[in-house]
Image (spheres, rainbow, N blue to C red):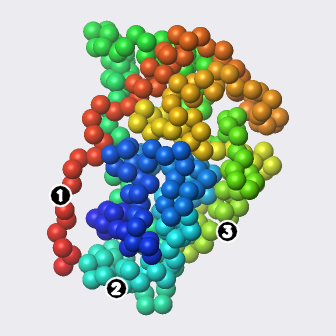
Amino acid sequence: MELGERLFFEPRLSPSGKVLCATCHVPYRGWQDGRARAFGLAEADRNTQSLLNVRYQRWFGWDGAGDSLWAQSVRPMLDLREMGGSQAQAAALVRGDAELACRFEKVFGTPPPAADEAVLAGIGKALAAFQETLVSGRSPFDDFRDALSRGDFSSMKKYPEAAQRGLRIFVGRGNCSSCHVGPAFSNGEFHDTGVPFFIKGGADAGRHGGIRKLEANPFNLLGAYNDDRSGVSAIKTRQVDLQHRNFGEFKVPSLRNVAQTAPYMHNGSLATLAGVVRHYSEIDPDRLHSDGEALLKPLRLTTAESADLVAFLESLTETASALAPRRPSAACR
């Protein structure tokens, strides 16, 4: 984990020396960047997702092109618009820096002299180990849920009435909980949300393109660098089935700490939670795939109902810092 933390804040992972993982995943911004679309060396096509609770995800990235957190961590290092690096450059950094080489050796063994790809996989795994420590804290909704389960009506009254009304819409006629379900408020799957997927020069294929990238990725769980020799973790990758309906589908994001991660949607096109609620309230069913999202129908919420739903969404944000301050680790010996 300490190696991963050092690498996360290491600008030399980018040949420019100007871009690091924390450029887009800023700790004090909920581990994202507050931009509509990510910007490393150049502007990307998609919004930066928060890293909070990323350890609990099954697929990674808006399109699910990563089937593991460590493989997803490799991708930005090689992307020309993000960090613009290469296998050789990343491996040379680890081999050439005494502190990084020492820490790498303690975890993975001596960096192979002619196996840059293996070193890059190790870097990804170290970065993943750090990201797995980023877990959100308790929210007002959690306190209300627990009070409800034990019949503590006095504590339940502390939860705002507007949020309670919004919760009824969320699990009731809004049908939001069909996709935003479970502890993370996400089913972890991919859907057409009615948000345009056109980008400069074409269209963002979403999950359809993500599956193609996943299949071609030497770091996927079917490849040589999966530490799970049982093959169980790779079952999901082996069973992925590319279908036409996947075009324009994007992953359902977690709603944990959602009040801290504006702007929203895969392209950052909605600036506020009120805008997201308005989008679903007024959604055009004709915009959706004909074989896809029968769940989505215009909610036609009133102004008051929309405000209540926003109040509920805001109550999913933690009341304390998700990450305690860390002391600098001692030098590697």
- Residue 96, label in figure: 2
Residue 185 in sight in this render: no
Which residue is labeled 3 in the image?
216
Q: CA distance from mark 2 to mark 1?
A: 25 Å
Residue at x 69%, y 50% (from the top left corner): 199
The answer to whether the residue labelled 2 contacts the one labelled 3, judged by CB atoms less than 8 Å apart, is no
**Quarter occupied by residue 192:** top right
| Mark nearer the viewer, 2 or 3 | 2
Which residue is labeled 1 in the image?
327
Could you tell which of marks 1 and 3 lies nearer the N-terminus?
A: 3
Q: Nearer the viewer, residue 40 or 286?
A: 40
Density class for disc 2 (Cα within 10 Å; few <14, some 14-19, many ≥20) is: few
**Residue type at numbered disc 1:** Arg
Could you tell which of marks 2 and 1 lies nearer the N-terminus?
A: 2
Q: CA distance from mark 1 to mark 3?
A: 40 Å
**Residue type at numbered disc 2:** Gly
Residue at x 63%, y 27% (from the top left corner): 279
Residue 98 x, y percent position in the rendering: 27, 83
Q: Name the image quarter holding the N terminus.
A: bottom left
| Mark nearer the viewer, 1 or 3 | 1
Density class for disc 3 (Cα within 10 Å; few <14, some 14-19, many ≥20) is: few
Q: State whether residue 278 is above or below residue 329.
A: above
Q: Secondary structure at mark 1?
A: loop
